[in-house]
Amino acid sequence: MMFGLPESENEDLSEKISEVFQQLEEKPRFDATRLGKSKSEKARPVKVILSSSTVAQQLLLKSRNLRESEKYKSVFLSPNRTAEERVKHRELVVELKRRTAEEPQRKHFIKLKAGEVVSMG
């Protein structure tokens, strides 16, 4: 899933996504569609279907580099999660924010595979 990609009328979605992937130094084969109804105030998310899960993992790992790009700093990638996974992830983010507020001197992060928030330092 790709979020924050600006939307325009008569856009060439494949070209826009290819530019984002170029920024990540990747050129995968993909299919993409915008989800939901068009609303002028907010860009719709984009569902990107890639040729393999390995390619998807590479892109997700490199997606942090988009923050450093002026053009794509508002674009981020996320795995396509089920409703249950989204609820669990949301709970982890709330826990992460709570711990960060309570203990700002420590480092906190989410271990997705373990499904837990970890604190260090």
Image (cartoon, rainbow, N blue to C red):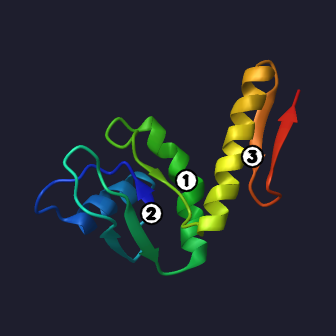
Q: CA distance from mark 2 to mark 1?
A: 9 Å
Query: Most extreme residue toward the bottom, as rendered?
Result: 51
- Give the label, 2 or 1, closer to the camera: 1
Residue tagged 3: 110
Percent coordinates x, y for residue 72 in the rendering: 36, 43
Mark 2 vs 1: CB contact within 8 A: yes
Percent coordinates x, y for residue 7 in the rendering: 23, 53
Q: Measured along the vertical axis of the image, is residue 70 above or below residue 29?
A: above
Amino acid type indicated by mark 1: Lys
Q: Is residue 111 left or right of residue 97?
A: right
- Foreground: 38 or 61? 38
Q: Residue at x 79, y 21 (%)?
A: 102
Percent coordinates x, y for residue 70 in the rendering: 35, 35
Residue tagged 2: 26
Q: CA distance from mark 3 to mark 2?
A: 26 Å
Say which quadrant the C terminus sits in: top right
Name the image quarter holding residue 86. Answer: bottom right
Q: Residues within 10 Å of mark 2 (few under 14, many from 20)?
A: some
Q: Secondary structure at mark 3?
A: strand
Q: Residues within 10 Å of mark 1 (few under 14, many from 20)?
A: some
Q: Is residue 117 left or right of residue 57?
A: right
Residue tagged 1: 62
Amino acid type indicated by mark 3: Ile
Query: Most extreme residue toward the right, as rendered?
Result: 121
Name the image quarter holding residue 56. Answer: bottom right
